[in-house]
Image (cartoon, rainbow, N blue to C red):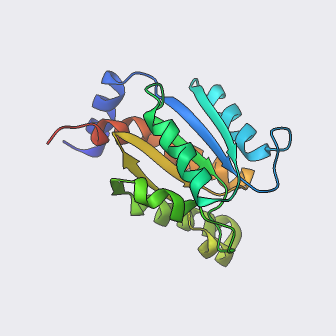
Amino acid sequence: MGVEEHRATAAAGAARPGWAVVTVSDTRTAETDLSGAALVDRLRRAGFEVVRRALVRDRVAEIRNAVRGALRDRRVDVVLLTGGTGVSPRDLSPEAVRPLLERELPGFGELFRILSFAEIGSAAMLSRACAGTADGKAVFLLPGSPKALALAMDRLVLPEIGHLLDQARRRA
C-alpha cells in the first residue's frame, strides 16, 4: 500500500484526535502565552478539540509531569509542546521528553529544519524540534516562535497526523 492509500485508510477510519498543548516557558503567563494561544487557535480553526492545556516552567520535572499527565488522559491523542527546543542552557524540553518516547521520529526534526532553513537560513540549525510516539499517541516538541509553529503545523503535523496515529496504534 502506498503512502496516499495509507493516508486515505487512516482518514476513513479515524475519529478526530484530541489535542493537548503544553507551553514551556519561564517568562510567559497565561495572558502572555502567544505560542500556546496560536496553537489552540490553529487547531480549533482546523476543526480539532484542545482537551488539555498547560503552562510549565523550563524544568525537566515540570515538563515531564505535564507530558505524563497528557499521555494518561484518555481524551488526548496528540501532545504538542511549544518552547524549550533551542540550545540555551534553559531549553530542556527534549531532555525532559525523550525518555518518555517509545519511538522517535527523526524525520520530523529533519524536515522541520529543512523547511525552516528555506525561511530563516542557517539559524534553523539551532532548533532541536523533535517528535515521537508514546502509548499510541503522538508527541511533538516545537519551537516557541508563532511563525515556526505555523510552519510545523501546516506543513508537517496537520497533514500527517491521521496517518501517524493509525501507524502508532497498529498491533504487531
- x and y, in percent, of residue 160 in the image: 43, 42
The reply, left or right, for residue 167 in relation to residue 32 is left
Outermost residue to the front: 61
Q: Residue furthest right?
A: 31
Quadrant (top left/top right/bottom left/bottom right) for the C terminus? top left
Q: Is residue 167 above or below residue 48?
A: below
Q: Nearer the viewer, residue 119 or 60?
A: 60
Query: In the displayed structure, would residue 103 be above or below residue 123?
Result: above
Q: Residue at x 44, y 34 (%)?
A: 72
Q: Position of residue 34 (x, y in %)?
A: 79, 44
Which corner quadrant of the image does residue 86 belong to?
Answer: bottom right
**Is any part of residue 51 visible from this angle?**
yes
Instruction: State the quadrant of the N terminus.
Output: top left
What residue is shown at x 59% (from left), y 49% (from top)? 81
Residue 158 appearing in the image:
no
Residue sitting nearer the eye, 17 or 116:
17
Q: Nearer the viewer, residue 31 or 63?
A: 63
Q: Residue furthest bottom?
A: 122
Left or right for 66, reference 84: left
128 w.r.t. 133: above or below: below
Q: Residue at x 65, y 61 (%)?
A: 84
Give the x, y percent position of residue 19. 54, 32
**Residue placed farthest to the left in the image?**
172
- Image location of residue 108, percent across then percent down: 46, 58
Please report the residue visible at 79 percent of the width from the left and 44 percent of the height from the top.
33
